[in-house]
Image: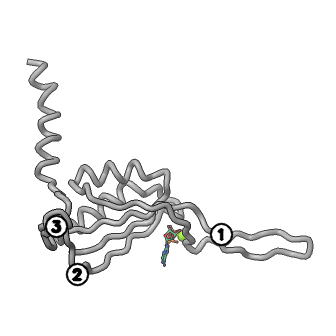
Amino acid sequence: MKLIVAVIRPEKLADVKRALFQVGVTGMTLSRVSGHGGERDVVQHYRGESVVLEFHEKVRIEMACSEEYVERTIQAICEGARTGDVGDGKIFVMPLERTVRIRTGEHDNDALTAINADEVMRQTQLEMRVPKLEAL
Ligand SMILES: Nc1ncnc2c1ncn2[C@@H]1O[C@H](COP(=O)(O)OP(=O)(O)OP(=O)(O)O)[C@@H](O)[C@H]1O
Ligand SMILES: [Mg+2]
C-alpha cells in the first residue's frame, strides 16, 4: 500500500476529482492548505527591492491505495491538475504500513475504501449503453 499526497491548485480540484473517479479511486481526504513552491515575488521599496516568499492557497488530497492503483492514481492526478504553468502542484508517494477499517476491523487492502474500478467501468458502460438501446 502507498499513501499518495497531492498538492494542487484549488481551481483544478473538480477536474482531479473527476479523473480519480474515472479510474475508480473514491476514498480520499481533502484539506485547504497554504503552500510555497519556489516562486519568488519581488517587492519594491523606497530604498530598493526585496524578495519575499509568499504562500498560496492550495488543496491537499490524501489517498491510501493498494499497489495496483498507484500508477493510475498518479496519472489521473496529473491529467486533472496540469495547466502547464508553474505551480501546477506536486505528488508525494509514501509507503503505507497499515490500514484499519474501524467499522469492520478489516486490515490493509481489505480495509481500503472500495476502490473498485471494475464497478465504475461497468456503470460507465451501462450509461453509455442506454442511449444506444433507446435509439433502437
Ligand atoms: N519540496 C516540497 N515540499 C513540500 N511541499 C511542496 C514542495 N514543493 C512544493 N510543495 C507544495 O506543492 C505546492 C505546489 O508546488 P509547485 O507546483 O510550485 O511545485 P514546483 O516543483 O515548484 O513546480 P513548478 O516548477 O511547476 O512551480 C506548493 O505550494 C507546496 O504546497
Ligand atoms: Mg513552483
> If the image is split into quadrants, where does the C terminus sit?
top left
Instruction: Judge by depth and name the residue closer to the eye, 130 or 60.
Output: 60
> If the image is split into quadrants, where does the N terminus sit?
bottom left
Q: Earlier in the sequence, mark 2 or mark 3?
A: 2
Assess disc 1: are there few (<14), some (14-19) or many (≥20) residues with their C-alpha within 10 Å of its C-alpha: few
Quadrant for residue 37, please give it: bottom right
Label drawn at residue 97: 2
Residue where numbered disc 1 is placed: 54
Decide: is 117 above or below 103: above
| Pointers 1 and 2 in contact (C-beta within 8 Å) | no
Q: SS of the residue at dot 3?
A: helix
Q: How many marks?
A: 3
Residue at figure coordinates x 16%, y 68% from the top left: 68
Quadrant for residue 103, please give it: bottom left
Residue 22, given in percent of the width and then of the height, sits at 24, 49
Assess disc 3: are there few (<14), some (14-19) or many (≥20) residues with their C-alpha within 10 Å of its C-alpha: some
Q: Earlier in the sequence, mark 1 or mark 3?
A: 1
Residue 63, given in percent of the width and then of the height, sits at 30, 65
